[in-house]
Image: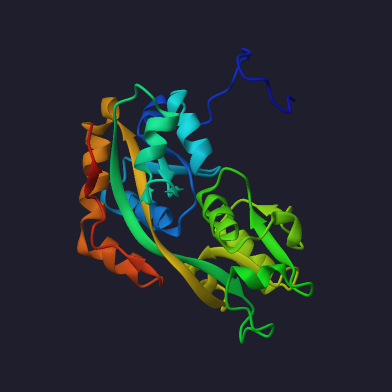
Amino acid sequence: SSEGIRAGEQGEVELLRSHDEIAATILVVGSHDIALDVLSSELKHHHSRYSLASIRLGSLAGLVALGRGEAHMAGIHLFDAESGDYNLPYLERYLPGTRAYLVNLVYREQGLMVAAGNPLGITGVTDLARDEVVFINRQRGSGTRVLLDYQLEQAGIEGADITGYELEKYSHMEIAAAVADGSADAGMGIMAAARALGLEFISITRERYDLVIPESYFDTGQVARLREIMQSRPFREKVTALGGYDASRSGEVMFEP
């Protein structure tokens, strides 16, 4: 009968699963990507003892959760304007002193999702400032929001210039659904989400989505099985078929401590 407790408080809980089942669950916190759903399905199919649970809070929240020891890995796609690199600069910034690996999940196309036929003739982020365009945004701390804000800064556009900039959703599919049902004219997301709901997609950049895995967890059997699946042909083919993905380096270590 509780709606929640504050961080640091203690309370009694009733486990609805066995200790063994909980111990065999891999918890990923961070950015949302459809490829994680494919990975979860493939893991269950090939290694039924294990399961993958994904909590979609955004890239920065994933790093914070990892730093607190609240997850096994974090999914991130964070562009660093200063270096022009993805992800590694944020490890140094948000996980100082933590030895962690970066393992690639996918490269993917990120851009604007608009209604089929693109009735408003949107071609890029500069069109988001037009009076007749209603935008739907991702939450603060998400890699997509970081990318959008960088693109707007490059174009000399303020968030206040965009109708709907303050309206936030927590996943690519939520953004796609808002555009599909007409509550917004455009939203930032991945090509796979646009294709899933029959939307038009305007590509802005190709980005790298990695899994951050602490060294203390990297050498476990669970991670070995995950990487084995990521490097398999069936996984790569299923992800590629979703549209806008390059899975050729899935499972590859991009950085090791």
Residue 112, how many percent across, how many down? 56, 69
Residue 173 picture quarter: bottom right
Q: Is residue 170 visible?
A: yes
Rendered view: 104 above or below 14: below
Rendered view: 19 above or below 34: above
Q: How is the image coloured?
A: rainbow
Q: On the rendered image, what quadrant is the N terminus found in? A: top right
Identity of the residue drawn at 34% across and 60% down: 107
Residue 22, how many percent across, how many down? 42, 30
Identity of the residue drawn at 33% across and 69% down: 240
- On the rendered structure, is 81 left or right of 170? left
Residue 145, how many percent across, how many down? 57, 52
- On the rendered structure, is 176 left or right of 32? right
Identity of the residue drawn at 67% across and 20% down: 6
Rendered view: 211 above or below 183: above
Q: Nearer the viewer, residue 52 or 131?
A: 131
Q: Is residue 195 visible?
A: no
Residue 206, how many percent across, how many down? 39, 64
- On the rendered structure, is 29 left or right of 102? right
| Total numbered badges shown on the rendered structure | 0
Q: On the rendered image, what quadrant is the C terminus found in? A: top left
Query: Hey, which residue is sitting farthest front in the picture?
Result: 156
Q: Nearer the viewer, residue 143 or 29?
A: 143
Residue 131 picture quarter: bottom right
Identity of the residue drawn at 49% across and 30% down: 65
